[in-house]
Image (spheres, rainbow, N blue to C red):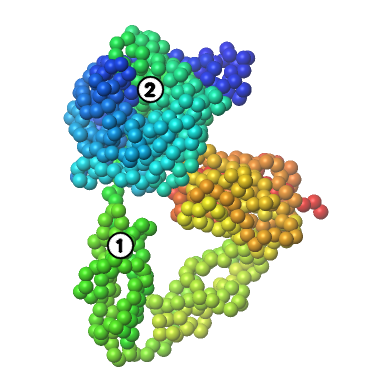
Amino acid sequence: MLTSKFAAVLAVAGLIVGLTAPIANAAVVQVAATVETAPIPGTPDAADDPAIWIHPTDPSKSTIIGTDKSRDGHGLVVYDLSGRQLFYYPDGRMNNVDVRYNFPLGSSRVGLVGVSNRERSLDFYKVNDSDGSLTKAGSFLPTASIATPRGFSFYHSPDTGKYFAFVTDVGKVEQWELDGSTGSVKGRLVRSWTVSGPAHTEGLVADDEMKRIYIAQEDIGGIWRYGAEPGDPTAGTRVVSTTENGGDIIQDIKGISIYYGGGGAGYLLAASQGSNRFHIYSRDDNRPLGAFAIPAGNGIDAVTGMDGIDVTNFGVGGPFPQGFFVTQDTANEQRQNFKAVPWQSIAAAYSPALLVDAAYDPRKIGAGTATPTPPDTTITSKPANPTTSTSAQFSFTSTSASATFACALDTTSFTNCVTPVSYSGLASGTHTFQVRASDQNGVDATPAAYTWTVGTTPPPTDTTPPETAISSGPPATTTSTSASFAFTSSEANSTFQCSLDGAPSAACTSPQTYTGLSTASHTFAVAATDAAGNADATPAIQTWTVAPSDPGGSSGIVRESVSQSVNTTATTTLTVPKPANVAQGDLLVSCLALNGGTVAATGVPAGWTRIAAVTAIANPKVYGYFKVATASEPASYSWMTTSTTSGAGIARYSGASGLDGVATSASGAAASSGTVPAVTTTAANAMLVGCVSVNSSSVTLTSPAGMSQAVEAGARRFEVADGIQATAGPSGAKTWAFSAAREWAGWMVALRPKTP
């Protein structure tokens, strides 16, 4: 943990991190301001919140935008980097302000300023690059729940490219999706909730890379962290607490801001109005890193009773070549104003020094983001062509999960429809069916279409069976107890029948997956049948062997079978079937991967003991549990969670007597790999079991060297992998590779072999 240079002398007093005294009582770094702005126009309690706008081509022309919430000043003020007032807009009792770049306004991409107006609106302005002036670009009202708009923050989604506005008042929070397509900013409410605990909420800041929104709660409160995507749960995590709750910061917590660094590095900053200090927390796991104050110096008075803050890492030249921090000052020598401190001065006052990273460019937020496009439409089933049937049925789908459909037959107009749609009494001749999807991004301009002919004479008889081919499957020998096969037919519109190990054939589709396979030789067969009913008499066949996880036989621990389950829609119950052939004494190990949700202590099925709970990041959150099987196990096991999408797997091991040592865990920001620290085993031939999940439903995971995949699945993509460690001692850290950079979390534990 970082501490101030002044803290060393207080170590014997028990004030350094790791001891029981709160950091609020530790020595505080003192860093004087170098720039102060001209006083705000209004009185008495007028200045509230600053925001930094960075010029697109000449950073020295960047500005500080401050709010005046008073009744006589009531507006926005724009200052240059020397603190000189450039513009004043008396448009209302402006409270909190924020800035984002590359917002699509009409046919242009602009710097956008958003502000909460205490006179009941959210107001927006375009920044004019030529001189930093502002032009009104729209306004709308939040719902009646937000009686006096106070806290305000933008958020740009890296997943969808959409821009959002968050607003809060007395514990109520609303999230609005922004649309500037008409040249004026409009809003659509997409989420709302109430923060738990004390009602006073104001400070807001979004982390656009980690997809988080932080909310400062005044009085005996703290800082709450939520997922920032509109579909994320509304249950948050309090990551910072006031001293009354055993935390490190004195109430009231006012402004909060994010210092961005490259690769997910950086800090969360918070203003403690009750102590006249500013606290710094790590950006990834929000652990406390100390505090600083702004005393009198450089001909500028001290900062006290502060409200809003902002910070930028980006070098803007002049007095701030490596970024700067700006704060409101309540007790100014004249009317209230804002004061700025070079970031490098704050960073250098800590030992070790804080990060100084002027490379991250906030102006790239939203740059190059693809304009949202209407969904594509695909016909998935249709009648044969030609056909003698005077009826037809069509099934269809879309690239958008929220799409609705409209259908048309021949020359009729499009009308609303759902899949499948059927037609009867068709006349002889040629017919054309069309279907198009639509969602919030528009209507598919190129409907999917199919033309076929209804005739009175049947088509020539087809007597030739299709040829079936297996295009992918497991290797000849594998330790995986799961297998997936992809297959094709030489004729379109064929159906398939599959069989495993000589069992009766059953209808199937490609790919066909099997899980919980025993350690033995297996045979898969698949045969196609064409639209005329001709069946392939010579099925495609593949034989492979599932070997024990420890083919050398040096360990008695063997992964025998696995089971898994995925909830692709949000629910509060995650039920996983019992793996195949569970016997008394087997050790069951489960992994749960949640899309930002949590598992309560009372939500664990009977007999299961927690291995790990990796919950430091917003998404994913990963849990591990184990259980020694009894003589009578239920058919499935259910965990109770907060409402979320989720996935889980259970692996069954024979020859294991329990856990060998304690689990390790880790999590991280978006990256192409994730490393879980080593575990230390006390017995030879222990089985290492690890689980890693990523914030994606499509990214694939590659197991660490020496470990093999037991389960991989996902609406929350996750993998359970295992492998024998022949000798006792440290296992070494294990790294999972990802097919694309994503946030991740995971754990690892060792299983102890039974003694002979």
Towards the viewer: 95 or 653: 95
Structural crowding at the residue carrying mark 1, measured as other residues with C-alpha within 10 Å and reported as few (<14), some (14–19) or many (≥20)? many
Q: Nearer the viewer, residue 265 or 572?
A: 572
Could you tell me which residue is drawn at 30 percent across and 16 percent down? 44
The residue under label 1 is 437
Amino acid of disc 2 = Asp
Screen quadrant of the N terminus: top right
Residue at the location (45% across, 36% down)?
A: 195
Q: Do callouts 2 and 1 mark residues in contact (Cβ within 8 Å)?
A: no
Relative image position of residue 395 (x, y in whole percent): 36, 71
Numbered circle sitting on residue 321: none
Farthest residue toward the right? 756
Looking at the rendered image, the disc whose residue lies closer to the viewer, 2 or 1, is 2
- Label 2 element class: loop
Question: Amino acid type of disc 1?
Answer: Ala
- Quadrant of res 748: top right
Residue 115's spot in the image, x, y percent? 29, 32
Q: Earlier in the sequence, mark 2 or mark 1?
A: 2
Asked whether residue 689 is in view, the answer is no
Residue labelled with disc 2: 307
* Residue in the image at 46% along x and 53% along y: 697
Q: Nearer the viewer, residue 605 or 358?
A: 605
Quarter assignment of residue 95: top left
Left or right: residue 296 versus residue 723 is: left
